[in-house]
Image (tube, helix red, strand yellow):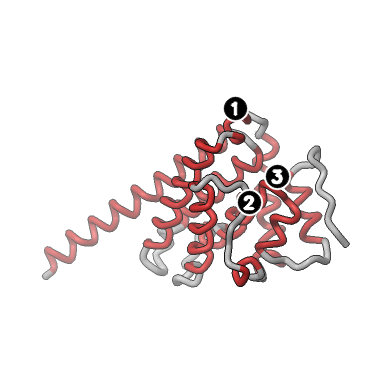
């Protein structure tokens, strides 16, 4: 059964429809369903696990690597996902089966307050390039956070919210994502510098 996406449907409904369909739950399948928004949906789902306020122990690094590649495509001005075939065929696994219902509930919260704000910006390649750079920066910050520290949560959450702003075409949500991600980067740098000073004094 193919999933039919209606432009008038809420994104949360489209996501649930995809989840309930019987097509493969792969990264490449997202582009088939969500068309030009497929890369943003992929970034949202890939960074959802690092955004959870729990230590992941570095197991999410593969998701972060794929996210950086997708965002680099945005910087290059690509309107469709470019990934090696092996990655396009990668099953989303637990994210699709258990994570998406949780994500849908959070997306619906945003949808209640969201409306298109400066939506035309999201049709501009230069704007998407800037968003790609922001996604790369926050994703790299999340990847460099110490394992089991939980410090990757805020930068990763910033990426998730930025991806959601692309899907909903709302710059207010984009601003929220930027603040969250920037706060996470500042926290990582601040605590990292404090740790360095501590060990210098210790030894």
Classed neighbour count for the residue bearing mark 3: other residues with Cα under 10 Å, few (<14), some (14–19), many (≥20) = some
Q: Nearer the viewer, mark 1 or mark 2?
A: 2
Percent of width and height locating residue 90: 64, 70
Residue behind mark 3: 108
- The residue at 55%/38% (across/down) is 125
Residue behind mark 1: 118
Identify the secondary structure beneath mark 1.
loop
The quadrant holding residue 140 is bottom left
Relative horizontal placement of residue 195, taking residue 164 as reference (left or right)? left
Identify the secondary structure beneath mark 3.
helix
Query: Cα distance, mark 2 to mark 3?
Result: 25 Å
Number of numbered markers: 3
Relative horizontal placement of residue 62, taking residue 22 as reference (left or right)? left
Quadrant where the image shows the C terminus: bottom left
Any mark on residue 80, and which?
A: 2
The quadrant holding residue 52 is bottom right
- The residue at 63%/51% (across/down) is 80
Query: Cα distance, mark 1 to mark 2?
Result: 22 Å
Of mark 1 and mark 2, the one earlier in the sequence is 2
Q: Nearer the viewer, mark 2 or mark 3?
A: 2
Classed neighbour count for the residue bearing mark 2: other residues with Cα under 10 Å, few (<14), some (14–19), many (≥20) = some
Percent of width and height locating residue 133: 44, 46
**In this orientation, which residue lies closer to the viewer: 8 or 156?**
8
Of mark 3 and mark 1, the one earlier in the sequence is 3
Query: Cα distance, mark 3 to mark 1?
Result: 21 Å
Percent of width and height locating residue 55: 47, 67
Classed neighbour count for the residue bearing mark 1: other residues with Cα under 10 Å, few (<14), some (14–19), many (≥20) = few
**In this orientation, which residue lies closer to the viewer: 192 or 84?**
84
């Amino acid at each position: 059964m193919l999933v039919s996406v209606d432009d008038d449907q809420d994104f949360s409904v489209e996501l649930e429809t995809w989840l309930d369909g019987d097509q493969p739950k792969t990264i490449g399948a997202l582009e088939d369903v969500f068309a030009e928004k497929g890369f943003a949906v992929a970034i949202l789902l890939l960074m959802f696990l690092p955004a959870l306020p729990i230590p992941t122990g570095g197991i999410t690094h593969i998701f972060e690597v794929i996210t950086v590649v997708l965002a680099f495509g945005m910087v290059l001005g690509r309107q469709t996902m470019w990934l090696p075939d092996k990655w396009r065929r990668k099953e989303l696994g637990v994210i699709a089966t258990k994570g998406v219902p949780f994500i849908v509930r959070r997306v619906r919260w945003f949808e209640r307050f969201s409306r298109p704000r400066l939506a035309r910006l999201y049709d501009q390649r230069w704007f998407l390039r800037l968003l790609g750079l922001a996604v790369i920066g926050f994703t790299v910050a999340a990847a460099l956070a110490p394992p089991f520290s939980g410090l990757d949560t805020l930068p990763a959450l910033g990426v998730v919210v930025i991806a959601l702003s692309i899907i909903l075409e709302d710059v207010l949500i984009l601003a929220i994502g930027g603040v969250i991600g920037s706060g996470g980067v500042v926290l990582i740098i601040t605590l990292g510098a404090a740790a360095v000073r501590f060990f210098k004094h210790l030894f």
